[in-house]
């Protein structure tokens, strides 16, 4: 057995970089090239890989440590069968993945210059590899003013991501690359109209009062052509710096490690409040954002932080058949989950005495047949709902402006849940309040037929303000329907049954229709729901009241 100490390699000119993540612990087995820890400097983050395979004996750095080139990272015990590896305590000073370059080496090919500005092509600097790398972000647009050192693009390899800074102050004239493409060393990224005021003013310009640039000043450009600030006028520089900051903010100003972390968490960086210099988003800002998002009510808009239901291998317990779900089923599933997670549901129950209504409906059976129609209880329910909705307008409203306003619908369009072989669909009957029972009966038949034949158009399923889900023909004593958000209430109708009802002197056989009203308690309170359902029951109990 032999022990080797892995050291921080050349990290591209940075004096020191912060350990942002330790990837291994004592006892871990590591392979050659496996990352031991992640370092982050102002301009790049990089994994420090192990150059030997073996077992981690000791990790010599912890998160937050500042490590410079040559600092010890970890002691690895290697298998002594290793052939040509150096003996114990060999110092490993070269990472498998070359270190990214620092701003100082950003390359620029000067083009013919003019008296005041010089057009230069900014190319991909030495990124330590000849392989193409991903260009994951363009931080500037054509016309943007940039200060020397401002981030132009962000590149990423498997092991490191790095910002390519501007080698000079100036104006972006043309972009030569697209986000998402691959580039390699020497490829032209963009054309910069760099400001050149001559070597005598260059020094004073470097130290010009440009606070934005000063806080995170990159190493001075190596090229002698590197341009200075346009002038030593503080106002001008401040304006340029602000513009540069705006440009960076558009593309978001954050280090590579923060970007990677944000991608892992799925956090949109543009939503994160920055606290770093020049509006730079720090790792702490990201942590703050994530903890606030998790603590917020309805975190993540539904489902965030909820443990996933594990996948079970059912075949282990007996024969199974896996069938692809229909698109309607999948969309319905997503909609149901969205409503269930976003809407605080309450369900209120009541029975409507539909003895007389049913007698009336049955008396119309012959006439319905003559008309080529069929009158089920549903058109009566729709009609009664329309009247009750007009009198209880909150039930026909929706939250708007993120919950700060309520939109009352001055129309009565009611959705009707239809059970089809392909899944549940909800066609909408428009202006229910203005239609006769016969018209409603015809429309129920037409829309239910279209639903089952999969002939509904998207417009047939839009615009509903309230939904009726009737399982009356199927059975059941009651159920709690899920609100069809952004509607705020839904009526679940179960099978009518004859029940003994006490009339004050004796029990009478009465046909009772079980109703369940689920509602969004952010909008509808118990009183609203109670009034609506009571009124609905009264209307169904005495349908003459529908005329009032
Ligand atoms: N109580 C007792 N009988 C009822 C009833 C009730 N509440 N509702 C309907 N019926 C009777 C009807 O009167 C009819 O009998 P008759 O022909 O003797 O009059 C019979 O049941 C069949 O009715 P239907 O289903 O053909 O018609 P409908 O108007 O009641 O319903 C429709 C139409 C499209 C809503 C229905 O077919 C349907 O798809 N329902 C399922 C909705 C659903 O899945 N909801 C759940 C959503 S959440 O998962």
Image: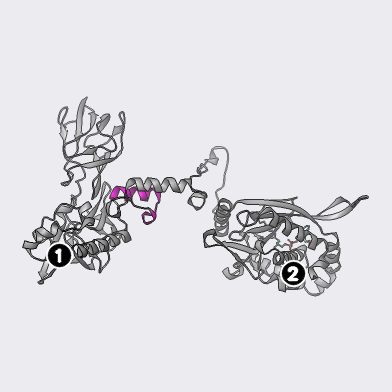
Residue sitting at x 93%, y 50%:
505
Report if residue 449 lies within the magenta region: no
Above or below residue 422? Residue 45 is above
Give SS at disc 2.
helix
Above or below residue 307? Residue 436 is below
403 or 301: nearer the eye?
403
Apparent side of residue 347 relative to residue 133 in the rendered image (left or right) = right
Q: Quadrant of ligand 1?
A: bottom right
* Nearer mark to the viewer, of 2 and 1: 1
Apparent side of residue 217 relative to residue 251 in the rendered image (left or right) = left
Q: Position of residue 24 (x, y in %)?
A: 30, 34
Report if residue 259 lies within the magenta region: yes
Looking at the image, can residue 272 be seen?
Answer: yes
Above or below residue 494? Residue 466 is below
Q: Quadrant of residue 151?
A: bottom left
41 or 331: nearer the eye?
41
Q: Residues within 10 Å of mark 2 (few under 14, many from 20)?
A: many
Q: CA distance from mark 2 to mark 1?
A: 80 Å
Secondary structure of the magenta portion, mostly?
Answer: helix
Quadrant of the rendering where the N terminus is positioned? top left
196 or 303: nearer the eye?
196
Stretch in magenta: 255-271
Residue sitting at x 57%, y 68%:
458
Residue sitting at x 36%, y 51%:
263
Looking at the image, can residue 35 be seen?
Answer: no
Residue that carries the numbered disc 1 in the rendered image: 231
Residue that carries the numbered disc 2 in the rendered image: 441
């Amino acid at each position: 057995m032999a022990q080797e100490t892995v050291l921080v390699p050349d990290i591209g000119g940075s004096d020191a970089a912060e350990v942002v993540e330790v990837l291994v612990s004592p006892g871990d087995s590591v392979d050659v090239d496996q990352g031991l820890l992640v370092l982050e400097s102002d301009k790049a983050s990089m994994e420090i890989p192990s150059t030997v395979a073996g077992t981690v004996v000791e990790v010599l750095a912890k998160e937050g440590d500042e490590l410079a080139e040559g600092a010890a990272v970890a002691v690895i015990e290697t298998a002594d069968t290793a052939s040509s590896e150096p003996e114990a305590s060999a110092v490993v000073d070269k990472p498998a993945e070359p270190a990214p370059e620092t701003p100082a080496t950003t390359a620029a090919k000067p083009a013919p210059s003019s008296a005041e500005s010089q057009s230069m092509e900014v190319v991909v600097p030495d990124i330590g590899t000849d392989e193409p790398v991903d260009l994951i972000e363009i931080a500037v647009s054509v016309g943007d003013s940039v200060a020397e050192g401002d981030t132009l693009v962000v590149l990423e390899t498997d092991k490191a991501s790095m910002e390519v800074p501007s080698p000079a102050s100036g104006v972006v004239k043309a972009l030569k690359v697209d986000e998402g493409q691959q580039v390699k060393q020497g490829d032209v990224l963009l054309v910069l109209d760099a400001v050149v005021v001559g070597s005598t003013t260059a020094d004073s310009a470097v130290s010009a009062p440009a606070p934005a640039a000063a806080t995170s000043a990159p190493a001075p450009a190596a090229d002698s052509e590197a341009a200075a600030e346009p002038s030593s006028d503080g106002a001008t520089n401040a304006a340029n710096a602000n513009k540069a900051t705006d440009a960076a903010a558009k593309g978001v100003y954050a280090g590579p490690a923060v970007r990677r972390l944000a991608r892992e968490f799925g956090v949109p960086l543009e939503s994160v409040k920055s606290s770093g210099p020049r509006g730079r988003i720090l790792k702490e800002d990201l942590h703050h954002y994530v903890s606030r998002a998790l603590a917020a009510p309805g975190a993540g808009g539904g489902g965030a932080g909820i443990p996933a239901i594990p996948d079970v291998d059912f075949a282990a317990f007996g024969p199974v058949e896996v069938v692809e779900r229909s698109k309607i089923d999948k969309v319905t599933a997503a909609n149901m989950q969205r409503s269930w997670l976003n809407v605080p549901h309450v369900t209120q129950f009541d029975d409507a005495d539909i003895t007389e209504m049913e007698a009336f409906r049955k008396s119309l059976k012959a006439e319905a047949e003559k008309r080529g129609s069929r009158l089920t209880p549903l058109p009566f329910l729709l009609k009664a709902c329309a009247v009750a909705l007009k009198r209880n307008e909150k039930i026909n409203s929706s939250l708007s402006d993120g919950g700060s306003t309520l939109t009352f619908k001055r129309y009565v369009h009611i959705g009707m849940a239809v059970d089809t072989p392909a899944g549940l669909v909800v066609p909408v009957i428009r202006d229910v309040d203005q239609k006769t029972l016969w018209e409603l009966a015809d429309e129920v038949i037409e829309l239910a037929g279209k639903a089952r034949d999969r002939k509904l158009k998207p417009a047939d399923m839009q615009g509903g303000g309230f939904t009726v889900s009737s399982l009356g023909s199927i059975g059941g004593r009651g159920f709690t329907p899920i609100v069809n958000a952004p509607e705020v209430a839904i009526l679940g109708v179960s099978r009518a049954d004859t029940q003994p009802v006490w009339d004050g002197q004796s029990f009478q056989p009465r046909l009772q229709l079980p109703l369940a009203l689920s509602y969004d308690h952010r909008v509808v309170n118990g009183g609203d729901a109670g009034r609506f359902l009571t009124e609905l029951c009264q209307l169904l109990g005495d349908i003459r009241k529908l005329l009032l």
